[in-house]
Amino acid sequence: MSKLYYKDKPLIGLDISQTGIKVMSIDPKKWLVLGYGSLDLDPAKVQASMDNQEDTYLKDNITTLLKDNIVGSLNSDHVVVGLPTGRTFSRTFTIPASEEKHLSGAVEVEVDQYIPIPLSSLYVDYEVIEHSKDTLTVVMAAVPTTLVDACLAAVRAAGLTPIMAEPSINAVARVIEATEEGHLSTLIVDIGPASTDIAVFDKGAIRVSGGVGIGGNTFTLDIAKKLDVALENAHQLKVLNGLSAGPKQAKISAALRPSLQRITTEVRKVIRYYNERLNDDHKIEQVLVVGGGANVPGIGEYFTNELVMPARVASPWQKLDFGALQEPNKQFRPRYIAVAGLASVPREKVWK
């Protein structure tokens, strides 16, 4: 990381997703929120802006967010940027310790075999996270160059200085590690408005990630269609009834089942990769469901039954102290988990 920047400035988080942007400034020692805000975006326009640096949609909305949508205050212009996890790739693999000098070549082989984008079109970073006498365990992250370049260009054009960028799921894991028995090997299911990010977090690192284009909005549409009700009514049925026992349980469960099964299928793929590729005794010890789309009563029990392992809805945002600031409405609080993780990146991680 370049050392040209002033190190005494605090860091703020800026999370960019397909459906919105969030910003937050916190005092990480106290987990005290100093300022925050969010803005919903048009997914199609976000996609266009991420694919073309000349498109100003992202920049314009970051500017609007900073000018008009902040509760409290932001104490810096230095930002850690969260990138849409669904557009990134995280993998963990092992190589013989004797091959350490050929590590960069092993990373290239891994990219060629498992990532459907040419190496020349990716930013790739990797780190040895375990070193035994016989093997090295390497965690690798790869992100399309067009995505990174477009997001960072928009951030700079809005008057901010990007210091670091990472997949949003890494930031979610940072908060979970601090709040939800993060020492355990954890499967994270982060259900956002339009997509679900899935990752295994173990020993302080994301070992593997995946995702599927289904989220909380999908659930609402499923209920509206199946029960032939308006979207507003469908949303109420989702958050008040959900999968819990009641007179409407059978119909709502039937409506949600296809989408939930698609998420479960992707979860199983991530678990299988983790179990097959990592030759150690670590097994997943907990499943945590987070994100705005996790507000479906009974969804924790659903994953417990489907995966035959303990699953629960986590609320790691509760660690945040909003002090004198007006807190977000209860239904919107989960959307700030990732940006809180971005805002709490340890300074030594940035400046090492």
Image (spheres, helix red, strand yellow):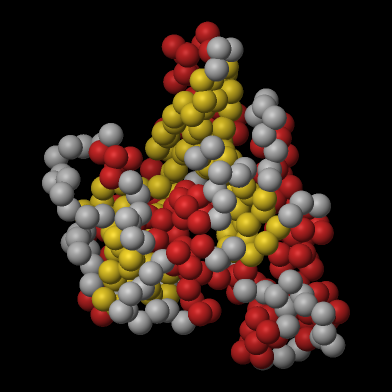
Q: Toward the viewer: 119 or 82?
A: 82
Quadrant that contains the C terminus: top left
Q: In this view, does 214 lie to the left or right of 29?
A: right
Q: In this view, does 219 lie to the left or right of 162?
A: right
Give the answer, above or below, for where 149 lies relative to 122: below
Q: Percent from the top left, x then y, of residue 140?
A: 49, 33
Quadrant that contains the N terminus: top left
What residue is rendered at 80% in x and 75% in y? 253
Q: Toward the viewer: 144 or 300?
A: 300
Q: Is residue 112 visible in this depiction of the protein?
A: no
Q: Percent from the top left, x then y, of residue 255?
A: 78, 76
Furthest-front residue in this view: 30
What residue is rendered at 48% in x and 68% in y? 318
**Quarter of the image holding residue 244?**
bottom right
Q: Percent from the top left, x then y, of residue 6?
A: 13, 46
What residue is rendered at 65% in x and 87% in y? 236
Q: Is residue 207 visible in this depiction of the protein?
A: yes
- Give the number of callouts: 0
Give the answer, above or below, for where 201 lies relative to 326: above
